Amino acid sequence: MYKKYFPYFKNSKNIYLDTAATAQKPSIVLDAINEYYTQYCSNTHRSNFGDANRATTEFEHTRELLKNCIKAKESKEIIFTKGVTESLNLVASSFVKDRFDTVIISSLEHHSNIVPWHMQERSLHKGLEVVNCDEDLTFDMEHFENLLIQNPNSFVSITHVSNAFGKLHPLKNIIQTAHKYGALVMIDGAQSLPHFNIDMQDIEADFYTISGHKTYGPTGVGALYVKAKHLEKLRPYQTGGATIKDVSYDKTVLLDSPFKFEAGTQNIAGIIGFGKAIEFLQNIEYKNIINYENEIYEYLYEKLGEIKDVIFYTDSINSIGSLSFNIKGLMAEDLGILLDKMKISIRTGHHCAQPIMKKLGINGTARVSLAIYNDKNDIDIFIKGLKRAIKILKD
Ligand code: PMP
């Protein structure tokens, strides 16, 4: 039903089931990028002529759209970055380092919410704590609370939705509990916005990281939401053009947020394109996205469940977007290779989440990740292909 908005599907016969890695882009995003480069390509926030002013206006329009979309209070709370990886690293290096004794993460983190902490010489029980999860990957609230009690000066950094398994964390509860013990919270929101709306006033995250390319926008674009009261303490980790109010050889006076964090020429076309992706989602409306995706996710779960020897890691109720599985006795990679030959694109492997794979005693999984452009026909083709692949590998 929504495929028609995405040129990729006119040009490719692939059944695309890898949106958790990156989403396809609708025409309005691609057209906006083309329009910027072909009709008013100029730098933003610098020159003062017609096209440059238009570029600045369009660029800032994306900030407003994102602010309204996630219900941030002020525009200065939205900082553009390259993506979630950069947003997490910015907070890790410019806010958390040297300020917090302990960083608490969940068992389901992407490497980009593990490695930055290792780079600060933190390791398990030495400045880094990991909240347990039970066998269906449910976040262990009791363990979390104990960790907060045992580590009074903690910073919590937790994914909203696991990219590897699609598991949804009980975010409000996590944030309220952390705040009860005086801990601040950053959320890795890479897998959220494509699937459901988020409300900063409701969840009360201190930092929330957003990925443009997973939200139907271009690659190389993302954002960091910072609650206004933390902005003063967040230091820019790089500076340069467009970040300054005044420079002499003695000193620099930086601009206020967000500009002091956006050094150098930004990914202008990408940010303008990201704005169109947000408009695209708003036109469809999140309630429709949620209903539609729930329906196809349940369908996928049901059809996969009918396959002999399938191993699931989560239930379907508390999961969204991605579904990971294995077939007993087979390597996920082999399934992926055979499915690729049938023009069905899924992802296999550890999904940049090696620690949880190790904990589960597996090398990886086969992961199907869905988006609004997928439909039951895609799932039927995938299931048929999977059955064929299993037969080839088992015979
Ligand atoms: N966290 C999670 C949960 C992700 O899925 C990803 C992307 N796979 C990232 C972080 C990194 O995001 P980005 O590509 O925007 O840097």
Image (spheres, rainbow, N blue to C red):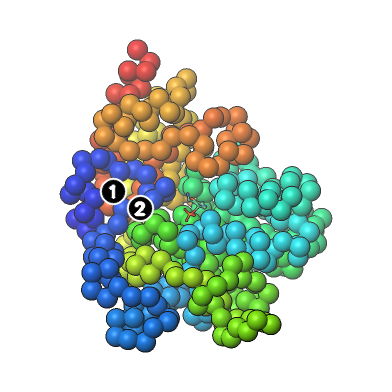
Q: Indicate the quadrant where residue 57 lies.
A: bottom left
Image point (29%, 36%), residue name = 344
Residue that mark 2 sits on: 23
Mark 2 Cα-neighbour bin, 10 Å: few <14, some 14–19, many ≥20: many
Q: Nearer the viewer, mark 2 or mark 1?
A: 2
Q: Is the residue 269 above or below the residue 43 in the image?
A: above
Provide residue 209's location: percent of width, then percent of height. Answer: 53, 63
Relative image position of residue 201 (x, y in whole percent): 54, 75
- Residue at disc 1, secondary structure: loop
Q: Is residue 286 visible?
A: no
Q: Which mark is residue 22?
A: none
Considering the numbered disc 2 on the image, is that residue within a helix, a strand or a loop?
loop
Q: Residue 237: where, in percent of width, then height?
A: 62, 66
Looking at the image, is 15 positioned above or below residue 250? Answer: above
Q: Amino acid at mark 1?
A: Asn
- Image quarter (top left, top right, bottom left or bottom right) of the C terminus: top left
State which quadrant residue 253 falls in: bottom right
Q: Amino acid at mark 2?
A: Ala
Which corner quadrant holds the N terminus?
A: bottom left
Q: Residue at x 66, y 66 (%)?
A: 94
- Numbered mark located on residue 374 in the image: 1
Q: Is residue 113 left or right of residue 36?
A: right
